Amino acid sequence: MPYKCLIVDDEELARRLLTNYLVQLEDFELVAACESAIEANTLLKEYPIDLLFLDIEMPVLKGVDFFKNLSQKPKVIFTTAYRDYAVEGFELDAVDYLLKPITFARFFKAIEKFESVQKPKETIETIPSAKDDFIFIRKDRKQIKVYYEAILYIESLKDYIRIHTKDKAVRHTIKYSISTFHKLLDKRFLRTHRSYIVNGDHITAYTACDVEIEAIEIPIGESYRKQVDAYLKG
């Protein structure tokens, strides 16, 4: 089952940013994003929460004071625009402390710390298992079969990759480097850019700058141009 998360921040922009980051991770589920500690307190009584993203400086009740008074404390990652609050956050055994504005890379680092705490005996690295026409990937703590034919393209997200499939509702995000993952795939898969691998069988059009898959334009990087041209014209 995915980890249940709750975001508590009085700034709408901060809530939206963390929400956008969280939805990219298959092993994490956002239960709610609320704007006050009072609202969060109600939600914590109703739902089991594994990870709390908690802003420190909020009106009425500060995040630190709120967390101190919780009888059942989930793991917490504090967020704030004020660096001076870091020490107080770590004294409460926080998983991490994120200074705003929070980048995607820094967010992932905090998630990795949480995973290492939750699964100290397991490796965080996901090792796919490749066969002739499909690959097994780890998702929701299970090994999921993904057929090559169903893959449209693969996108790099720093230390993670996202596999986009023909079913728009199905996307797989795993912790793996795009270069290493490419070696597990067969010859139909073409590296067009440092951040993209495409399934050549699904290319419907191309220009000198990009290839098109179901109206999605995937860029062609300069260092990959020759091999892309050879593939498309071969």
Image: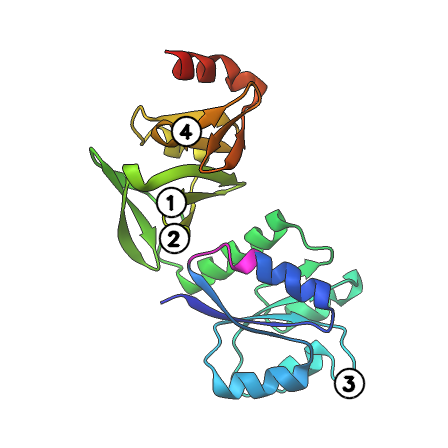
Point out the stretch of residues depicted in magenta. Answer: 21-26
Question: Mark 4 and mark 2: span between their CA atoms?
Answer: 19 Å
Give the residue type that dot 2 points to: Val
Question: Mark 3 and mark 1: span between their CA atoms?
Answer: 46 Å
Q: Secondary structure at mark 1?
A: strand
Give the residue type that dot 4 points to: Ile
Label 3 crowd bin: few (<14), some (14–19), many (20+), radius 10 Å:
few
Q: Can residue 151 be seen in this snapshot?
A: yes
Q: Residues at badges 1 and 2 in contact (C-beta under 8 Å)? A: yes
Q: Which of pointers 3 and 1 lies earlier in the amino acid sequence?
A: 3
Mark 3 lies on residue: 60
Disc number for residue 203? 4
Please state, as top left, top right, bottom left or bottom right, where the N terminus lies in the image.
bottom left
Mark 1 lies on residue: 165
Mark 2 lies on residue: 170
Tell me which secondary structure the magenta stretch mostly adopts.
Answer: loop
Question: Mark 2 and mark 3: span between their CA atoms?
Answer: 41 Å
Q: Secondary structure at mark 3?
A: loop
Question: Mark 1 and mark 2: span between their CA atoms?
Answer: 6 Å
Q: Is residue 168 magenta?
A: no
Q: Name which quarter of the figure residue 2 lies in.
A: bottom left
Circle nearer the viewer, 3 or 1: 1
Question: Mark 4 and mark 1: span between their CA atoms?
Answer: 13 Å
Q: Which of pointers 2 and 3 lies earlier in the amino acid sequence?
A: 3
Residue 140 vs 132, above or below: the answer is below
Question: Mark 3 and mark 4: span between their CA atoms?
Answer: 55 Å
Q: Which of pointers 4 and 1 lies earlier in the amino acid sequence?
A: 1
Tell me if 130 is positioned left or right of 15 in this view. left
